[in-house]
Amino acid sequence: MKQSSCAILGVMALAAGISAYDAEGTGAEAIPLLDARVIAVNIPGASAVSQVGTFLHNPASCSSPIPTSFPSFIQPGAVLDPNRILVGSRSNFGAPRAEGVGQEGAFLSIDPSGSAALTIPGDFASSGGQASALGGSVQMFSANSPFFLNSVNNPDANTARFTAVSNPLGLSNNNAFGRLWPANAPFGDRRIGTSTVLDPTGRPLAGAPAPLLGGVYAGRLTNRNAVTTPQQPQVIRGSLRTAAVGTALLGPSPDGSCKAVFSVVTADGAIVQEHTLKGLDGVAPAGTVEPVQGQKWDAPYQDVEPRLGVLMNPYAPPPGATSQLFISEPFDNTITVVNIGVTGAAPNQVFAAMPGPVKRISSVALDQPVDLAPTQIDTDSITWASNTTLSEGSDIYVANRGNNTIVRMHQDGTVVAIRRVSIDRRALDEARVNGIATSPDGTKIYVTFTTDGEEQGGLLELPAFGG
């Protein structure tokens, strides 16, 4: 007989650290509940989340598209099956940890189609590599383990000793012309961050355009002046000098090289850009975004690493801009909107924050906004299709860690609707939402949560909602 979600939670309460309370009498009744289905539990520090989605087969792409270069990895049941969900965690799930390059951490690939909640075995990946468990319902995509070292594919890289994942806090899938890009805080928020470009194998990019870079950006080791041959100075100063806490695809480089460029927000509030051939340049200085460095969630959740959401809007930006970045500021209860333009002389044009103050969206509906997701993802643009790209006219879902609500708002900050996450019509307690994503068809919302104590967590599925 099929168990209810609450019955499942009762059985798993010790392992998952999640319980519920009756919303009546708490003031929560003013906000409608949005009932969730429990997909998986026992995911320590569950953080960034994304449905894999379809990788486009673009004949004009200057990269090697996944559908032709790695076709077996996107088949039904495979690790990058378009329907599977990628979830970041602070655990290696038993995989041996690489020495000297930071904390454990992994991205799991989870099949959401089952009717029963999955309890992820804590050591299922002890054999190393892309291990699987529960009949393939959970698979290791990548982890801080020797199997996933940059040196495997890029032995001469400045970052050869680093791995693909270490305490991951962000994820952007480049569905337009290939690869997945995690953002990591391997040494906490005060030391260097890493950002990686991963093949479907979970390893850093093979055949990388810049051999000194490979597939891992770290600290100052992969700045433009450190990886280009002959050496080129940075166009805009910047580095991953603090943890990488959020990321989003920007699109092809404005220099005409047809190489992907990603934005990364660091713990000190800077924004940088990463070019697969020319390395890292800045976009905006520290403090542009409200820093999360040194910040802590309220007790008893203070041991969960702060993170934030980043979305890119390529449609109808302000005059003179190429796009906008929406970046959540959880400790200021705001969302920053940074207009992005282009600077630099040919052939070294780069993206840059446009002059002037950034716009900030404020609302009483924002309560520690930890992550953002499009209500409609751009899934078909061969230029910038990604889980972090807003489709034209899309609204934004905001995951509020402070009160476990999801806010739907227009891009100008107008609130459309608010829902409180619940299970069997009972609002969450002793857990906090920590990440949000939407399905490519816009009908489902995926939310990660974390708990106190042992920093357990899990994955929920909810229905999309409008006004």
Image (cartoon, helix red, strand yellow):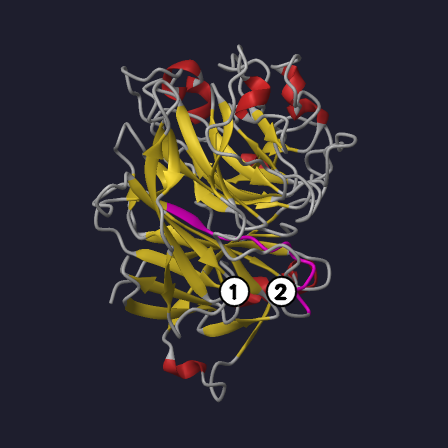
Where in the figure is residue 224, as x and y percent of width and height?
53, 24
Q: Secondary structure at mark 2?
A: loop
One can see residue 340 in this view: yes
User: Does 382 appear above or below 266?
Assistant: above
- The answer to whether the residue labelled 2 contacts the one labelled 1, judged by CB atoms less than 8 Å apart, is yes
**Residue sitting at the far bottom:** 25
Q: Which label number is shown at residue 401? A: 1
Q: Which residues are magenta?
A: 300-311
Q: Find residue 168 and report its horizontal and vertical position in percent.
A: 60, 42
Q: CA distance from mark 2 to mark 1?
A: 9 Å
Crowd rating for badge 2 (residues with CA inside 10 Å; few <14, some 14–19, many 20+): some
In this rendering, is residue 65 above or below 36? above
Pick whichever of labels 2 and 1 is earlier in the sequence: 2
Q: Nearer the viewer, residue 142 or 321?
A: 321
Q: Which residue is mark 2?
A: 297
Label 1: how many Cα within 10 Å (few below 14, some 14–19, many 20+): many
Q: Amino acid at mark 2?
A: Trp
Location of residue 351 in the rendering, given as x and y in whole percent from the top left corner: 38, 34
Q: Is residue 219 magenta?
A: no
Image quarter of the C terminus = bottom left
230 with respect to 394 (left or right): right
Q: How many marks?
A: 2
Residue 309 painted magenta: yes
Is the magenta region chiefly helix, strand or loop?
loop
Which residue type does callout 1 highlight? Arg
Residue 83 in the image: state x and y as whole percent: 40, 38
